[in-house]
Structures are given as C-alpha cells and as structure tokens.
Image: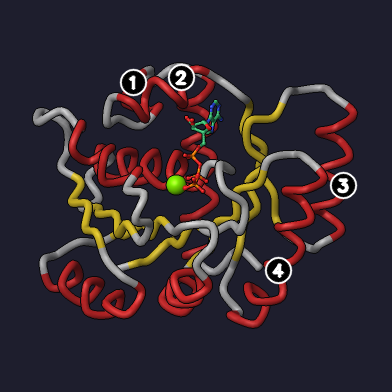
C-alpha cells in the first residue's frame, strides 16, 4: 500500500479538496483507495458521507496522529492499495505522523505571499523526511503576474510544482462526494486532477525528487 500525505500549515489551501479528488480518481481507476482524515474538522469524512453509493468505494477513516500507524496497518490488511492522508493545518503531531508514513508528500498552497511563506517554513521538515514532494499552487488565476511570481518562488525552493486553477468544478465535486474526474471527466478540473495523479505515480515510481 502506498501512502500520499497532503500537508500545509495554512488553512484553506486545498488539502481536503486535493485529498478527496485523488482518492476518488484512483478508486474509479480500479485502485482500492482510502482516506485517513487526521483533521477533527472532518472535511474528508463529510466527503465520504456524501459519496454516492454507486461510485467506487472510498473508505474514509477518522484517526488521531497517535493511531496513524495502526489505522494504516488495518487498511493495508484490508487490501487498500492507495491511502491519502488529509491533515489539519495547525497540528504538528499530525503533520509529523503524516510525513513519517508518507511515500509521497503533496503541499498545496495558494499563490499568495503568506501561503508561500508558510510553504517555505514547512520545507525543512519535508526535506528532512527525504520523501518525494510536490507543491500544488491552488486556486490560481492563469496568466497573472502573481502566478508567475509564485511559480518562481516555489521553483527557488527546489520543489516540483503543478498549478491548479480556481474552478467551480473543484467545489461542486467536493460537495457531491466526487472527484472532478467523476463529476466532469472531460473538464479542465479533471485534467488538473489527472495531472496530480500522474505526478504522484511518477514519484512513487522513483522518478521524482
Ligand atoms: N481549485 C479550486 N477552485 C475553487 N475552489 C477551491 C479550489 N481548491 C479549493 N477550493 C475551495 O477552497 C476552500 C478550501 O479548500 P479545502 O477545504 O480543501 O482546504 P484545506 O486546506 O483542506 O482547509 P483546512 O486547512 O481548513 O482543512 C473550499 O471551500 C474549497 O471548495
Ligand atoms: Mg481540510
């Protein structure tokens, strides 16, 4: 079983949106998938509860950082092949646990100075974890100076980067317990979701940092 942990110190950067989109996409692609929700806010759990019964099942397990290893062991034993760990923004133990168990780390950040500062401040822990990592600049507006500056700032941190635009399909999908690839398979948000999945697979195959 592979573990993809989604972390950022900033609230509202898109952790739960990305985590649920990936789980839904992998599950629909035939990969038995689960989410571990380390956030008491429970966004990923709410997504799981609203997921339509006729969709590929995604087990969402609520866990505390201290139980993460045990919960992941249980999922592995039940034949889950891909687990996405969604984390809260302000819980160092949750982030440390998620990094420790991760095969791949995803770091969503809005393209703002404050979010990029938070991303930079988390970089040391991710580098120390020696796990392949991908920054996701989320909710961007294409062709803006702000986006170009944010891309340059992330590149200067030595991180691989994907950009995801601000689109209603991301919100609609999350509200319906779906991934954008399930909501509107030919839409732009679906393309962005697949790009993240492909980057994750490459990193798992050892082609990332
Ligand atoms: N690409 C996007 N386009 C439009 N809306 C988005 C996009 N990504 C996220 N959102 C919206 O932004 C808000 C924050 O996203 P989300 O809840 O995934 O962030 P989070 O990092 O998990 O937040 P928290 O730190 O509170 O757990 C949500 O309302 C979500 O629907
Ligand atoms: Mg969240």
Query: What is the quadrant of the C terminus in the image?
Result: bottom right
Q: Are marks 4 and 3 in contact (CB under 8 Å)?
A: no
- Residue placed at 15% from the left, 28% from the top? 52
Disc 1 and disc 4: Cα gap in Å? 33 Å
Q: Is mark 2 within 8 Å of ligand 1?
A: yes
| Mark 2 secondary-structure assignment | helix
- Sequence-first tag of 1 and 4: 4
Residue 112, located in which quarter of the rendered image? top right
- Sequence-first tag of 3 and 2: 3
| Mark 4 secondary-structure assignment | helix
Mark 3 Cα within 10 Å, few/some/many (few <14, many 20+)? few
| Mark 1 secondary-structure assignment | helix
Residue 178, located in which quarter of the rendered image? top left
Q: Which mark is residue 152?
A: 3
Label 4, on which residue?
123
Q: Are marks 2 and 1 in contact (CB under 8 Å)?
A: yes
Which of discs 4 and 3 lies nearer the camera? The answer is: 4
Disc 2 and disc 1: Cα gap in Å? 8 Å
Label 1, on which residue?
183
Q: Position of residue 203 (x, y in %)?
A: 54, 62
Q: Give left or right: position of 16 versus 124.
A: left
- Residue placed at 40% from the left, 55% from the top? 86
Disc 3 and disc 2: Cα gap in Å? 27 Å
Label 2, on which residue?
169
């Amino acid at each position: 079983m592979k573990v993809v942990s989604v972390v950022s110190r900033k609230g509202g950067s898109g952790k739960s949106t990305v985590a649920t989109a990936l789980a839904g996409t992998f599950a629909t692609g035939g990969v038995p998938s689960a989410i571990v929700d380390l956030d008491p806010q429970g966004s990923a759990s709410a997504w799981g509860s609203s997921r339509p019964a006729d969709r590929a099942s995604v087990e969402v397990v609520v866990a505390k950082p201290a139980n993460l290893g045990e919960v992941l062991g249980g999922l592995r034993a039940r034949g889950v092949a891909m687990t996405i760990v969604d984390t809260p923004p302000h819980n160092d133990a949750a982030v440390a646990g998620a990094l420790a168990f991760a095969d791949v780390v995803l770091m969503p950040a809005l393209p703002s100075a404050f979010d990029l500062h938070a991303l930079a401040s988390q970089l040391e822990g991710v580098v120390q974890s020696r796990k392949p990592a991908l920054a996701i600049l989320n909710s961007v507006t294409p062709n803006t100076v702000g986006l170009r500056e944010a891309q340059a700032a992330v590149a200067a941190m030595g991180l691989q980067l994907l950009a995801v635009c601000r689109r209603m399909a991301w919100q609609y999908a999350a509200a319906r317990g779906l991934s954008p690839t399930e909501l509107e398979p030919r839409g732009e948000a679906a393309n962005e979701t697949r790009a993240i999945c492909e980057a994750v697979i490459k990193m798992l195959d050892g082609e990332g940092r």
